[in-house]
Amino acid sequence: MTDETTKHGAEASKPAEEIVTPAEADVQDMFEDADEATQAESVELEAARAEAADFRDRYLRLAADMDNLRRRTEREVKDAKSYSVAGFARDMLAVSDNLRRALDAIPADVRAGADAGLSTLIEGVELTERSMLSALERHGVRKLEPEGQKFDPNFHQAMFEVPNPDVPHNTVVQVVQAGFTIGERVLRPAMVGVAKGGPKTAAVEGEASAS
């Protein structure tokens, strides 16, 4: 038996599944290449998804920032419209105060016995005061009416205390100078006198609710 015969005999004795033909090797290589390509595509897909999520997060943040900017701008424009006349209104209040002082300076007996000329003058001053306050009100300026209300440091400025045991403590009993607001802000606090020595407000409210 020759060596060639021995070689062919050994190959023939191998199991069928261990014999790989050239065609099968090519197919196996193709599958391996396909697996590698699939893995590479999977990595690229994950990277693309991560990038898309990052872009989406950036977009949402930008949209939120733009919405906040829009709201802030609208608020600033509204405030500018509402409070742009604050300085002018404050100056006009000084004029209104002088008109009121002039009217208050007229004694009651003089007013009652005034002739036609003086009566016309008084009416003219009163009309001017009302017109001025009405014009200010059209621009958002409102007069405070604190008398009889509980003292509020946000809107009132206490000038003195009035001993009065019959009125709840810290109640506004006298207005020295009228206060005004413009929009939601205080243009000028009301200068007031407050009651002292009366029952506490909480106690009064408790008695009222019990009754």
Image: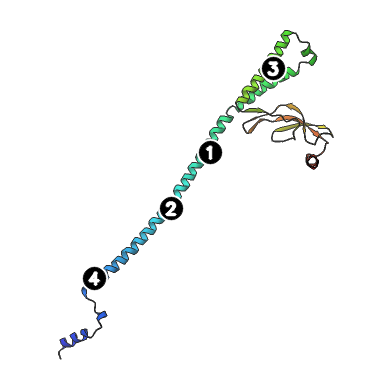
The answer to which of marks 1 and 4 sits earlier in the sequence is 4
Q: Inspect the image, locate mark 3, and give the three-letter code of the amino acid beneath it.
A: Glu
Most extreme residue toward the right is 165
Image mark for residue 26: 4
- From the viewer's perspective, is residue 15 above or below residue 131? below
Q: Residues within 10 Å of mark 2 (few under 14, many from 20)?
A: few
- Mark 3 or 2: in front is 3
Q: Secondary structure at mark 4?
A: helix
Q: Amino acid at mark 1?
A: Arg
* N-terminal-most mark, 3 or 2: 2
- SS for dot 2: helix
Mark 2–mark 4 distance (CA, rounded to whole Å)? 42 Å
Disc 1 versus disc 4: distance between alpha carbons?
A: 68 Å
Q: Residue at x 46, y 48 (%)?
A: 60
Q: Quadrant of residue 130?
A: top right
Q: Quadrant of residue 164?
A: top right
Real-space Cα separation, disc 1 to disc 3, in angstroms: 42 Å
The reply to whether dot 1 and dot 3 touch (C-beta < 8 Å) is no
Q: Which of the two discs, 1 and 3, sits closer to the camera? A: 3
Mark 1 closeness class: few <14, some 14–19, many ≥20 residues within 10 Å: few
Q: Pointer 1: what residue?
A: 72
Q: Earlier in the sequence, mark 4 or mark 3?
A: 4
Q: Position of residue 186 (x, y in %)?
A: 65, 32
Of labels 2 and 4, earlier in sequence is: 4
Q: Is residue 92 above or below residue 31?
A: above
Provide the residue designation for mark 2: 54
Q: Kindly state the secondary structure of the residue where label 3 is placed.
A: helix
